[in-house]
Amino acid sequence: MKIEKKTWPEQFDAISRGEKRFDVRLADFDCEVGDTLVLWEWNPQTKRYTSRAVEKKIKYVLKTREAKFWKEEDVQKHGFQIIGF
């Protein structure tokens, strides 16, 4: 299945160059390993799409409502970071 989403220029460029190999999204849509994520570049100043797109095959999906790996106060103090490799 193809899933189309918008992404801002900074993220679009990093994904296009192969530097960013992950995406963090609200889990308000279904996706599975093997689906194709089509990211359309969105310009927040003009509030328009630029017509540039990049397609990426989904290799891994992690869905969670909460990460109970850490204490709540540590999460509030430090936040989360997503590390791609």
Image (cartoon, rainbow, N blue to C red):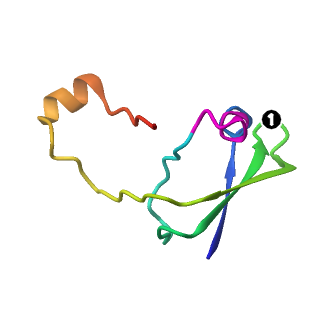
Q: Main secondary structure of the magenta part?
A: helix
Report the amino acid beneath label 1. Answer: Gln
* Residue corresponding to mark 1: 45
Which quadrant holds residue 11?
top right
- How crowded pointer 1 is (Cα within 10 Å; few <14, some 14-19, many 20+) is rated as few
Side of 81 relative to 22 (left or right): left
In the picture, which quadrant includes the C terminus? top left
Q: Depth check: 8 or 54 in front?
A: 54
Please provide percent x and percent y for residue 37. Answer: 63, 61
Query: Residue at coordinates 23% horizontally, 23% vertically from top-left?
Result: 77
Q: Residue at x 15, y 46 (%)?
A: 68
* Left or right of residue 76: residue 24: right
Image position, residue 67 (x, y; %): 22, 47
Of 52 and 65, which appears nearest the observer? 52
Residue at image x 73%, y 35%?
13
Estimate the x, y position of residue 21 in percent, counting from the top left: 55, 42
Question: Which residues are the magenta region?
Answer: 13-20
Height in image: 20 above or below 26?
Answer: above
Residue at horizontal 24%, vertical 29%? Answer: 76
Query: Where in the figure is residue 51, as x and y percent of width and height?
Result: 88, 52
**Residue 4 included in the magenta stretch of the image:** no
Residue 20 to residue 3: above or below: above
